[in-house]
Every structure is written in C-alpha cells, then in structure tokens.
Amino acid sequence: MNEETINEKLEKLKNKELAELFVEKADFLSVRKVIVNRSDFKHFRGTALRGGDVLYQYLDEPRS
C-alpha cells in the first residue's frame, strides 16, 4: 500500500465512513509509519490479530 492510499483509508476511518480498518501483516509497517506521523495518532487503536494482522479503530477520545 502506498502512503496516499493509506491516508485515504485513515481519513475514511476518522470520518466514520469505515467502522474498522483491517491491515495485513505485510502492510503493517507502512500503515504504522503514516499513523505515528499524524497529529491525531492517539485516536487510532490497533488490535493485533493472530498471524500478525491488525484491526484499527478510530476513537472519539484520544487514548492516554
């Protein structure tokens, strides 16, 4: 996944167009790199799944 595609999906997640974003293990590092550089990165919660995949959700309140 390229950075532009990742940002589009993260914006959809933020705007509640997507409830969750499923990220495969192969794309995890690319997605993580984009998320940690966002000003709202504390609103993203990633849940690790079996096999190295991650399920991201956008929280209304930032995590601590």
Image (cartoon, rainbow, N blue to C red):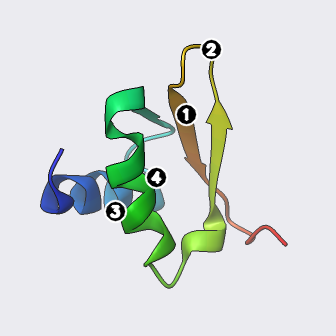
Mark 2, secondary structure of its residue: loop
Classed neighbour count for the residue bearing mark 4: other residues with Cα under 10 Å, few (<14), some (14–19), many (≥20): few
User: In this orientation, does residue 24 appear?
Assistant: no
**Quarter of the N terminus within the rendering:** top left
- The location of residue 42, given as percent across then percent down, is 66, 71
In x, y percent, where is residue 4?
Answer: 14, 62
How dense is the environment of label 3, judged by Cα within 10 Å: few (below 14), some, or many (20 and up)? Answer: some
Kind of element beneath mark 4: loop
Q: Amino acid at mark 1?
A: Leu
The residues tagged by marks 3 and 2 sit, at their Cα atoms, a distance apart of: 26 Å
What's the distance in space between the residues labelled 1 and 3, CA to CA? 15 Å
> What label does residue 50 carry, if any?
2
Mark 1 crowdedness (10 Å alpha carbons): few <14, some 14-19, many ≥20:
some
Mark before the other along the chain sequence, 2 or 4? 4
Name the front one of labels 3 and 2.
2
Q: Nearer the viewer, residue 58 or 30?
A: 30
Place of residue 63 in the rendered image (x, y in percent of width and height, measured from the top left): 79, 67
Q: Circle 1 sits on which residue?
A: 55
Q: Residue 19: in sight, yes or no?
A: yes
Answer yes or no: do the residues labelled 4 and 3 have beta carbons within 8 Å? no
Of 20 and 24, nearer the camera is 24
Earlier sequence position, callout 1 versus callout 4: 4
State the image coordinates of residue 16 (x, y, percent, origin top left): 46, 52
Is disc 1 in contact with disc 4, using a CB cutoff of under 8 Å? no
